[in-house]
Image (cartoon, grey):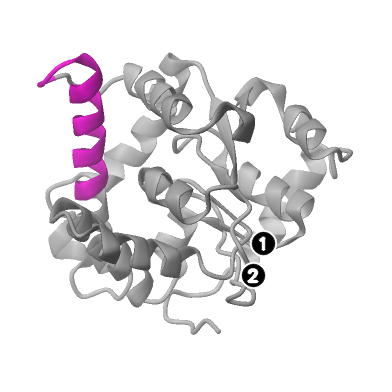
């Protein structure tokens, strides 16, 4: 969850691309790449959960709850509001709402980044270790923005469990196979002509080729840019236009 939040542009901006790779598949790098290739603000879900104003993560919780209640109209309204002003989005919880995003933006391009399941599970375990402790809801309760994080983790976990149950049967535990089930789900719901599948080891080359552009920067330049953006990150209490 390391992406620094980009400020949204004009509300008339239309979503053009979705980074549908699971968390810990280079979603922060994907945010940077897409911003340079598509030339507009790209929302990194994890970064926005930690840095945006309180109402932003609250709306994601409301979207999850509305979907559970079967209120499709409300879900679509909330999801559209969440990505308003962005040309692209990556990471959770955006990816959890891929079906709704496809309905709202039927011509959107989708980029699915894959990764070795064992290495991915070892990497995402770092996130899970601090995202799921029993004391987190109590600790986060008085903190604007952060107070919604436990609820989002809860809904994300339920979505993952349901996805595994549909693929492999009820009671399937989380593990390295989750990313494979997720990838199959993405491939099944996205039209093939709108989907680019690439491995994390390939770097940005397939992405740049798909957009017909030269890769905008090398690895060292990307690292420098990320450090600069991290230093300029806004606090969660800041306002957004």
Residue 166 in magenta stretch: yes
Please tell me whether mark 2 sits on a helix, a strand or a loop.
loop
Q: Main secondary structure of the magenta part?
A: helix
Q: Is residue 66 above or below residue 215?
A: below
Look at mark 1 in the image and give the residue it sits on: 229
Q: Name the side, left or right, on which 139 lies relative to 40.
A: left
Residue that extends furthest to the right in the rendered view of this protein: 214
Look at mark 2 in the image and give the residue it sits on: 232
- At horizontal 21% and vertical 23% (from top left) the residue drawn is 166
Rounded to the nearest angstrom, the CA distance separating label 2 from label 1 is 5 Å
Q: Residue 111 at x, y = what percent?
A: 60, 36
Marks 2/1 in contact by CB < 8 Å: the verdict is yes
Q: Is residue 92 among what the camera can see? A: no
- At horizontal 47% and vertical 25% (from top left) the residue drawn is 187
Depth check, front residue: 87 or 119? 87
Q: Name the side, left or right, on which 138 lies relative to 49.
A: left
Q: Name the side, left or right, on which 36 lies relative to 13.
A: right
Q: Residue 235 at x, y = what percent?
A: 48, 75
- Badge 2: few (under 14), some or many (20 or more) residues near its Cα, within 10 Å? few
- At horizontal 18% and vertical 69% (from top left) the residue drawn is 141
Q: Is residue 98 among what the camera can see? A: yes
Depth check, front residue: 73 or 227? 73
Q: Residues in magenta?
A: 154-171
Residue 231 in magenta stretch: no
Q: Is residue 32 above or below residue 174?
A: below
């Amino acid at each position: 969850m390391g992406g620094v939040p980009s400020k949204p542009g004009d509300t008339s901006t239309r979503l053009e691309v979705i980074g549908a790779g699971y968390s810990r598949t280079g979603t922060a790098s994907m945010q940077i790449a897409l911003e340079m290739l598509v030339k507009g603000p790209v929302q990194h879900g994890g970064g926005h959960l930690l840095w945006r104003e309180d109402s932003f993560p609250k709306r994601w919780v409301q979207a999850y709850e509305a979907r559970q209640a079967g209120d499709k109209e409300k879900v679509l309204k909330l999801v559209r509001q969440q990505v308003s002003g962005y040309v692209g989005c990556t990471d959770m919880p955006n990816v959890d709402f891929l079906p709704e995003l496809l309905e709202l933006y039927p011509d959107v391009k989708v980029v699915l980044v894959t990764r070795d399941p064992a290495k991915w599970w070892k990497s995402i375990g770092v996130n899970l270790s601090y995202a799921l402790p029993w004391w987190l809801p109590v600790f986060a309760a008085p903190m604007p923005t952060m107070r919604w994080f436990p609820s989002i983790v809860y809904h994300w976990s339920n979505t993952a469990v349901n996805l595994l149950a549909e693929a492999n049967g009820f009671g399937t535990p989380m593990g390295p196979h989750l990313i494979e089930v997720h990838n199959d789900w993405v491939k099944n719901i996205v039209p093939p002509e709108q989907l680019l599948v690439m491995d994390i080891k390939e770097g940005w080359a397939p992405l740049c080729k798909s957009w017909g552009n030269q890769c905008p920067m090398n690895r060292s330049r990307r690292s420098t840019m990320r450090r600069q953006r991290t230093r300029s990150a806004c606090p969660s209490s800041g306002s957004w236009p």
